Image: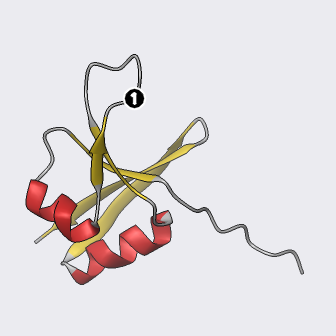
Amino acid sequence: SVPVPQEVGPTMVGDEHSDPHLMSILGAMKRSTLGNNFCEYFVNDAPRVVLDKLESLGYRVVSMTGVGQTLVWCLHRE
């Protein structure tokens, strides 16, 4: 059997307009990449760990797509 690759962080979890309280719960750090005029929140956790944390907070995955080598999840909380 072939082992399933496990992606590791950093994982982008939000932009500069994201809820600071939620970003704090996820342990995210805000940073700006050289050349960008905006900030993003990142965590060092793998995407699956972030999704597990969000699920425990009541978020559910609505859809997922790939953009190049990037995966994008859309979540919703009731």
Q: Secondary structure at mark 1?
A: loop
> What is the quadrant of the N terminus in the image?
bottom right
Q: Residues within 10 Å of mark 1 (few under 14, many from 20)?
A: few
> What is the quadrant of the C terminus in the image?
bottom left
What is the x, y in percent for residue 56? Answer: 25, 83
What is the x, y in percent for residue 64? Answer: 43, 54
Side of 29 where 1 appears, left or right: right
Q: Residue at x 48, y 54 (%)?
A: 10
Instruction: Look at the picture and state if 61 lies above or below 33.
Output: below
Quadrant for residue 34, please give it.
top left
Amino acid of disc 1 = Thr
What is the x, y in percent for residue 74? Answer: 31, 54
What is the x, y in percent for residue 46? Answer: 50, 66
Instruction: Look at the picture and state if 2 lies above or below 8.
Output: below
Q: Residue at x 39, y 29 (%)?
A: 33
Task: Return the residue at label 1.
Answer: 33
